[in-house]
Structures are given as structure tokens and as C-alpha cells.
Image (cartoon, coloured by chain):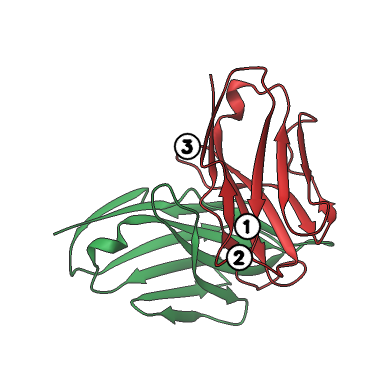
Chain colours: A green, B red
Amino acid sequence: KNQVEQSPQSLIILEGKNCTLQCNYTVSPFSNLRWYKQDTGRGPVSLTIMTFSENTKSNGRYTATLDADTKQSSLHITASQLSDSASYICVVTRRTYNTDKLIFGTGTRLQVFP
Amino acid sequence: GAGVSQSPRYKVAKRGQDVALRCDPISGHVSLFWYQQALGQGPEFLTYFQNEAQLDKSGLPSDRFFAERPEGSVSTLKIQRTQQEDSAVYLCASSLVAGGRNEKLFFGSGTQLSVL
């Protein structure tokens, strides 16, 4: 079954600290893997998109990694800020005949406290 | 507009009522997607348009759900005879090119539907 699992479900850290969120997937055939940030009451906002051949991609303080062999990805947040408090969703794109399908994880809820 | 716009922001419906949710994608975007997001869950695919053509509606949960994009820009998701299990946030997303492969998807803020 095509699934995306994220851990932890929720995370609390202090401002300025680093953290790493995990994503495991069983989606096949694989097209790409995306990380989104979703603030409460808002739509998801794209952070990174990685294809099969990419194993790391950065966007400011966000760094995503991808191991396509083990079907694992991580999102590392450096020097966290209060505004990083949000849900982080891992999305794997499954290649299909007519259009690719995005399979969403349930997200990691991150809270950053001062 | 600058981003994907959805209206209404919130909708409360009585069970059995019909509702219509609107999505204004970013101007010029070819691809348009509708997703359903239940509380505490990730979004789930409903349907996909390439311009005015509905190429994939495999995610629509029942024949009470209907979507259209008649002129290839604004899209409407209609739910007939709403039921409590339809309560969710309905997200619209668009991307510049067809298929959306490796392209960034831009999401609206969603319409939160509550069926009483």
C-alpha cells in the first residue's frame, strides 16, 4: 500500500535549538518527495522538492535529505524560531500514467517555545 | 491574484444541504487540484484539472461530489446532500504546468466545511 509515515507526531523545542523530523514511505513508483510547512488555518507551503537523484536540498534554515534506497527522508531545522511553529508534512509523489498523485503524510506538529 | 484564493473561508451547512466551494487559482496556472483534509490528517486527493479538462476524479468519495472548471480558470467543488462525514477542510492547489510533475504546488488557505 502506498503510505507516508512521519515521526514524531509532535515535537516541542526551545527557540534557537535544532530539530530533525523523519519521513518513511512505501510509495511506488516514486517521482519525487516534498516537504511542506502548514501553519494553523492555512494551506501548505512548499519547502523543498527532491527527485530520485537528489539526496539533499536546502531552503534557508531547512535542509531535507532523501535516501531513495531505504525510502527515508528527513527535514532538519537549524536555529529554530518561534515562527517555525507549524505542521510539517512529507509528501511523496507517485508516478501514474496520466498525472502524478501526491501521497501526504499526517505531519509532525512542531511547537517552538521562547 | 498573488496566490490561490478560496471562498468561503468557513461554511456551516445543515445535513442534506448542497454547498459550493470556489477556488481562484493563480492566473495562468494550468493544473488545478482539490484535496480534502480531515482534522489532524494530511490532505487527500479528490480531483485534478488540466485547464478545463477534468483528467482525474478518482478521489471523489461519492457521486454527491462534483467539480468543474468550465473556462480553465476558476473551479467550483459542489457537494450535494451534505453529510456529517463531509466535514473537513477543502484545499485547492494550482501549478503552472500540466501534470504538476516536479513542479511547485501552490495551495489556498482552504474552506472549512462543518456539516451539522
Residue A97 in the figure: left or right of residue B81: right
Name the mark nearer the viewer: 2 or 3.
2
Q: Nearer the viewer, residue B64 or A28?
A: B64
Structural distance between the alpha carbons of marks 3 and 1: 19 Å
Give the chain letter at badge 3. Answer: B
Labelled disc at residue B105: 2
Q: Residue at x 47, y 37 (%)?
A: B39
Q: The residue tagged with tag 2: helix, strand or loop?
A: loop
Could you tell which of marks 2 and 3 lies nearer the N-terminus?
3
| Residue B76 x %, y % | 72, 44
Could you tell which of marks 2 and 1 lies nearer the N-terminus?
1
The answer to whether residue B19 is above or below residue B25 is: above
Q: The residue tagged with tag 1: helix, strand or loop?
A: strand
| Residue B51 x %, y % | 81, 62
Give the quadrant of residue B3.
Answer: bottom right
| Residue B77 x %, y % | 71, 41
**Are dots 2 and 1 on a single chain?**
yes
Dot 3 surroundings within 10 Å: few (below 14), some, or many (20 or more)?
few
Q: For the residue marked with disc 1, what is the amino acid? A: Ala
Q: Quadrant of the N terminus of chain B?
A: bottom right
Identify the residue under disc 3: B39
Name the mark nearer the viewer: 3 or 1.
1
Whether the residues at callouts 2 and 1 have beta carbons within 8 Å, the answer is yes
| Residue A104 x %, y % | 57, 53
Give the quadrant of residue A93.
Answer: bottom right
Q: For the residue marked with disc 3, what is the amino acid? A: Leu
Identify the residue under disc 1: B93
Q: For the residue marked with disc 2, what is the amino acid? A: Leu
**Are dots 3 and 1 on a single chain?**
yes
The answer to whether residue A3 is above or below residue A71 is: above
Could you tell which of marks 3 and 1 lies nearer the N-terminus?
3
